[in-house]
């Protein structure tokens, strides 16, 4: 079904040689000085990754996605396939079991996965973006060996636990607690809207470790922990009432006095909020790239329909208002792609990209919702049924303007950046740039 992970070593050996030297990478102090020389071409490794993921999704997922979405069934074989291809650890260094590709390759994989269905990209967002990259940046060598390596190899699946029944955008409103008790922390609390909640082996959980700071809503009282499903007192369940991303697994988990070894604390005590925000930066990048793929899917389905459906004696694509909707999709696709590529290049350089990633996530997700709505409109009454995929596109698109920072949160962030009210300061830990080969 899938090629082995060794394909990436072969692609790297042949791809970089065929592509020649990469464009010179410079670091400019001014935000607008992204590069002295811009090159929008993908290299051979990027193109090979794009083709590999596109072929996998088209072959293994696309033929069944309509039925799985309707039945609200998550196909676990997808995880096996992504693991065998090395996609689950695509940008994790090889020394930690990953494929060692750059962050542009990760974005391309997410765009191709969401072109087929959002549920595929969600896997990458929580497993790679939110969890594995946090371990890569903040984890000890022991944590990387015990958790990051099997996650990168696809032997274990990971997710992220921040959202709670009464806390979404208000992260310091969470109630989960972690009480120190000798060599362990005792965790109690409940997390909701957790992707892969019933599938994941490992959970990155944010909880309060300082009750006094919690009472003052001081986020320096939060800490982060790696929680295994196998720990006594952990339970999870499925959320069946959602109407979007129905082919994905979404649920909840509860911790009833779960004892977590102190060595499973990620970062220092009190760094949980910083880790949570760091994780969201990485997750938002995958969401932005994925939403770009969804815009492309809406455009392609709309073009197919507009060229095959006739009204008033001509293809509906000849009508000016249909053209306008398709033109908007084309514009939004190209803009969204450039925005996530810029964020990916900053990641490749090891530069902080909170502002750029927020903009990419905001623009692409809002545009994907608009593209899906217009795709339904172009399809007319047929778009209002599940006979065609555009209805699924719209149902899926709605989630992305809510999770990992609502569109309103990102609106405020971008305004604050422009007004000078918000400035990103250096962080103790950053996502490492890809290793040179």
Image (spheres, grey):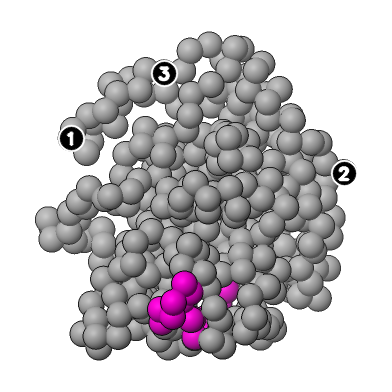
The quadrant of the image that shows the N terminus is top right
Q: Which mark is residue 363?
A: none
**Label 2 sits on residue:** 1
406 vs 218, nearest the viewer? 218
The Cα atoms of the two marked residues, 2 and 1, are separated by 47 Å
Marks 3 & 1, CB-CB < 8 Å contact: no
Residue plotted at (42% across, 23% down): 39
Residue plotted at (23% across, 77% down): 218
- In the image, residue 122 sits, relative to residue 72, either above or below, namely above
The Cα atoms of the two marked residues, 2 and 3, are separated by 35 Å
Instruction: Determine the secondary structure under disc 2.
Output: loop
**Label 1 sits on residue:** 30
Could you tell me if residue 87 is visible in this image? Answer: yes
Residue 184 in magenta?
A: yes
Magenta segment, which residues? 179-194
- In the image, residue 41 sits, relative to residue 417, either above or below, namely above
In percent of width and height, residue 302 lies at: 65, 54
Marks 2 & 3, CB-CB < 8 Å contact: no
**Label 3 sits on residue:** 23
Residue plotted at (59% across, 54% down): 147
**Number of marks:** 3
Mark 3 or 1, nearer chain start:
3
Give the image quarter of residue 34.
Answer: top left
Label 3 neighbour load within 10 Å: few <14, some 14-19, many 20+? some
The Cα atoms of the two marked residues, 3 and 1, are separated by 19 Å
Marks 2 & 1, CB-CB < 8 Å contact: no
245 vs 18, nearest the viewer? 18
């Amino acid at each position: 079904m899938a090629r082995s992970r060794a394909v990436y070593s072969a692609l790297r050996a042949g791809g970089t040689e065929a592509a020649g030297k990469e464009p010179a990478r410079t670091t400019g102090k001014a935000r607008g000085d992204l590069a002295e020389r811009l090159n929008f071409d993908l290299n051979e490794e990027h193109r090979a990754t794009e083709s590999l993921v596109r072929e996998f999704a088209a072959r293994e997922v696309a033929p069944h996605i309509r039925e799985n979405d309707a039945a609200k069934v998550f196909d676990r074989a997808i995880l096996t396939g992504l693991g065998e291809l090395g996609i689950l650890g695509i940008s994790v260094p090889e020394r930690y079991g990953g494929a060692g590709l750059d962050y542009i390759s990760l974005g391309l994989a997410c765009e191709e996965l969401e072109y087929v269905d959002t549920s595929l990209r969600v896997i990458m967002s929580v497993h790679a973006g939110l969890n594995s990259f946090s371990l890569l940046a903040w984890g000890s060598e022991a944590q990387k060996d015990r958790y990051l390596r099997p996650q990168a190899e696809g032997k274990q699946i990971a997710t992220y636990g921040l959202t709670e029944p009464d806390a979404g955008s208000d992260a310091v409103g969470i109630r989960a607690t972690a009480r120190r008790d000798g060599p362990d922390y005792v965790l109690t609390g409940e997390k909701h809207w957790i992707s892969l909640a019933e599938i994941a082996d490992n959970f990155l959980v944010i909880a309060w470790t300082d009750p006094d700071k919690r009472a003052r809503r001081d986020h320096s009282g939060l800490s982060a922990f790696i929680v295994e499903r196998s720990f006594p007192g952990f339970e999870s369940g499925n959320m069946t009432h959602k109407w979007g991303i129905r082919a994905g697994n979404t649920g909840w988990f509860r911790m009833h006095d779960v004892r977590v070894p102190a060595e499973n604390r990620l970062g220092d005590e009190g760094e949980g909020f910083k880790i949570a925000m760091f994780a969201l930066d990485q997750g938002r990048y995958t969401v932005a790239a994925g939403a770009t793929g969804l815009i492309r899917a809406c455009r392609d389905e709309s073009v197919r329909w507009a060229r095959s459906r006739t009204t008033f004696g001509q293809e509906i694509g000849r009508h000016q208002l249909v053209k306008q909707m398709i033109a908007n999709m084309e514009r939004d696709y190209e803009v969204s792609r450039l925005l996530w590529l810029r964020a990916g290049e900053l990641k490749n350089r090891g530069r902080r990209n909170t502002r750029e990633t927020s903009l990419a996530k905001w623009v692409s997700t809002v545009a994907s919702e608009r593209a899906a709505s217009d795709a339904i409109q172009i399809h007319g009454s047929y778009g209002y049924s599940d006979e065609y995929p555009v209805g699924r596109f719209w149902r899926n698109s709605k989630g992305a303007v809510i999770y990992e920072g609502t569109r309103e949160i990102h609106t405020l962030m971008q305004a604050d950046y422009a007004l000078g009210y918000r400035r990103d300061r250096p962080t103790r830990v950053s996502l490492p740039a890809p290793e040179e080969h």
